[in-house]
Image (tube, rainbow, N blue to C red):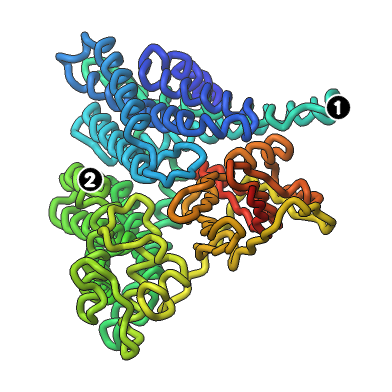
């Protein structure tokens, strides 16, 4: 009991000094918490317009918290820099500002014209995540310098231990504070906002990070700090967990995978590639993770694991390479195979390094992982670029072979095109059209993702080899649905009614109206991109008479019916209308169904508008 009390007092004392020892990191964490509080305070409809800058700030501060930790450790590990701690902190904060400017000016997604607001691109987010991961790995490499001799395994475990202890204390504080808030709500103030719990969670999250950083010892080697040995020591229950639970689990999984390896060698690989990728990734990452922890263990189980795992992993990885080659031959390089290739290269090189260099291999393995992370977000060779290039070459080859692409012009296929070619073309087209930031050739039309446009341009219906069912499983999403109630609508002022021939998520064909004063081409354009809204365009003899998006209508809807958790509203049909007026036309749009869906993890709302009809009056 006294030991726990002393640990708690010491931990909280260290936590209170974190602003002094890690100013850049803690100021970034504080900024992250403040931005979160502001977002909680604002209603979703009010903050939607500011989501881009909020996301830029959130990702910037998240990166700054880790970069600041790494920068301070770097200064501590270099005796010549220790007298310039303030300068190092200022440089770290300057770097944080540089990251924000990069995100703000270059991080938005290249969007269609009807996107309501700017959003951070997946590539920008991925690059910030790589910055966070590499900074954390650099921190561990630098932290290992304080131990004599150099001990990456000890620093690696120390980081996990700090995080685990911080989560325990943070969880207890969160449970206690939430319990008090619940008592106040139920006993004293029934109208208390649920946002109180969000504020509590934000403050506790900041305290948890403070405890995490405060757990680390002094990283200046010239100073004595008894907490260093405590920080890297393995408690008895951790030793028992590794020796008697985790090692047996990994070894049983190794046996299963070895049996699969033998079966694959004898009869060929028939397992779904995604399943192989998932199992192999989990096995490789968990196996290496456990190996690093067990570097200094002397128990028979640990020695057996260090002997068996590298050999078994090499055999399993060899067969996984076979499945990778077969998948590349089948559908060329995609993001899944790209990521699997990087994981395979890191794992295989890591196993070989550990097999021959033992403890000395750990820093080299970390540099290998960091290199793979950085490569994955680089131009040309990154996960966003190289698979797209490979799929463009694949599609061009398939189209040229059958005379469907001549001098940069698409022509429909002949009737004799076999199913395998149709499957390959369909697969490549759907992949390329689904990559929002892809730089595609001029002849490629993104509207090919629509079944009718695909058939019109390529001469055959889509043929998908494998249907993939995606299940969202999202929790905490924000959703609002409006449905039109039956009733009468006054349309006496309109002569023409145009009915769309599909759903809101499909690409529509142009609709022709032969009016008394001219022929009108009515286009209801829907974009397959999160955050985009439909666009109505009416032309006559090539002249645009009306071009309007649905932003104003959606703003009115959001103001009247703020999104909540799966809310459904039934409205009279006249409330599901919006009108536009020009010198030549009066136009009224009538909707059957309107939905707005927001996944908080992505922060990209999706708008669904099912059009009942378009009513027109010639002036």
Residue 311 left/right relative to 547: left
Residue 98 left/right relative to 25: left
The reply to whether residue 324 is in sight is: no
Circle 1 residues within 10 Å: few <14, some 14–19, many ≥20 = few
The number of discs equals: 2
Which numbered dot is residue 531?
Answer: none
Where is residue 516 drawn, in percent x and y? 61, 59
Where is residue 386 drawn, in percent x and y? 23, 56
User: With respect to residue 301, does 535 lie above or below?
Assistant: above
Question: Hey, which quadrant is residue 390 in on the image?
Answer: bottom left
Q: Quadrant of the N terminus?
A: top right
State the SS at label 1.
helix
Residue, x 38% and y 40% (percent of image)? 125
Residue, x 49% and y 37% (percent of image)? 117
The reply to whether residue 528 is in sight is: yes
Residue, x 34% and y 50% (percent of image)? 437
Q: Earlier in the sequence, mark 2 or mark 1?
A: 1
Relative depth, front residue between 183 and 453: 453
Cα separation between marks 2 and 1: 56 Å
Q: Which residue is mark 2?
A: 378
Relative depth, front residue between 433 and 63: 433
State the SS at label 2.
loop
Where is residue 153 drawn, in percent x and y? 28, 41
Q: Which residue is mark 1?
A: 187
Circle 2 residues within 10 Å: few <14, some 14–19, many ≥20 = some
């Amino acid at each position: 009991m006294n030991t726990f009390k002393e640990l708690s007092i010491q931990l909280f004392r260290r936590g209170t000094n974190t602003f002094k020892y890690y100013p850049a990191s803690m100021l970034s964490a504080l900024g992250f918490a403040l931005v979160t509080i502001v977002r909680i305070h604002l209603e979703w409809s009010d903050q939607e317009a500011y989501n881009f800058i909020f996301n830029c700030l959130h990702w910037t501060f998240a990166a700054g918290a880790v970069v600041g930790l790494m920068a301070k450790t770097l200064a501590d590990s270099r005796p010549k820099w220790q007298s310039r701690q303030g300068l190092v902190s200022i440089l770290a904060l300057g770097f944080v500002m540089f990251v924000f400017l990069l995100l703000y000016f270059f991080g938005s997604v290249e969007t269609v014209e009807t996107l309501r607001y700017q959003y951070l691109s997946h590539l920008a987010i991925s690059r910030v995540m790589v910055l966070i991961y590499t900074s954390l790995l650099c921190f561990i490499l630098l932290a290992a310098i304080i131990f004599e001799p150099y001990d990456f395994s000890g620093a690696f475990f120390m980081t996990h231990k700090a995080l685990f202890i911080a989560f325990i204390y943070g969880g207890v504080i969160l449970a206690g504070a939430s319990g008090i808030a619940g008592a106040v709500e139920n006993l004293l103030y029934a109208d208390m906002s649920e946002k109180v719990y969000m504020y509590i969670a934000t403050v506790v999250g900041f305290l948890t990070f403070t405890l995490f950083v405060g757990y680390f010892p002094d990283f200046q080697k010239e100073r004595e700090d008894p907490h260093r040995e405590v920080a890297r020591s393995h408690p008895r229950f951790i030793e028992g967990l590794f020796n008697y639970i985790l090692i047996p689990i990994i070894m049983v999984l190794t046996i299963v995978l070895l049996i699969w390896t033998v079966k694959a060698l004898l009869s060929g690989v028939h397992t779904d590639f995604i399943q192989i990728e998932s199992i192999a990734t989990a096995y490789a990452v968990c196996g290496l993770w456990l190996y690093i922890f067990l570097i200094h263990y002397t128990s028979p189980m640990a020695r057996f694991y260090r002997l068996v795992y590298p050999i078994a992993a090499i055999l399993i990885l060899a067969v996984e390479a076979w499945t990778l080659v077969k998948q590349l031959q089948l559908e060329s390089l995609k993001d899944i195979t790209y990521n699997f290739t990087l994981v395979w290269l890191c794992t295989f090189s890591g196993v070989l390094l550990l097999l021959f260099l033992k403890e000395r291999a750990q820093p080299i393995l970390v540099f290998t992982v960091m290199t793979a992370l950085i490569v994955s977000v680089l131009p040309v060779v990154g996960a966003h670029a190289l698979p797209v290039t490979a799929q463009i070459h694949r599609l061009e080859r398939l189209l040229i072979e059958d005379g469907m692409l001549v001098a940069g012009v698409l022509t429909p296929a002949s009737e004799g095109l076999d199913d395998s070619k149709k499957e390959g073309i369909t697969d490549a087209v759907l992949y390329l059209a689904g990559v929002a930031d892809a730089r595609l050739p001029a002849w490629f039309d993104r509207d090919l993702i629509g079944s009718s446009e695909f058939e019109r341009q390529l001469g055959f219906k889509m043929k998908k080899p494998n249907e993939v069912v995606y299940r969202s499983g999202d929790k905490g999403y924000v959703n609002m649905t409006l449905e039109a109630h039956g009733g009468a609508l006054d349309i006496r002022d309109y002569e023409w009614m145009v009915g769309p021939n599909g759903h809101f998520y499909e690409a529509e064909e142009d609709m022709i109206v032969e009016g008394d004063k001219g022929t009108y081409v009515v286009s209801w354009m829907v974009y397959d991109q999160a955050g985009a809204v439909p666009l109505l365009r009416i032309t006559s003899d090539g002249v645009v008479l009306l071009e309007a998006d649905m932003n104003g209508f959606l703003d009115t809807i959001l103001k009247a019916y703020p999104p909540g958790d799966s809310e459904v509203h039934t409205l009279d049909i006249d409330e599901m209308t919006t009108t536009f007026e020009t010198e030549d036309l009066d136009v009224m749009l009538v909707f059957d169904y309107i939905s707005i869906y927001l996944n908080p993890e992505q922060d990209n709302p999706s708008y669904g508008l099912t059009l009942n009809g378009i009513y027109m009056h010639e002036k």
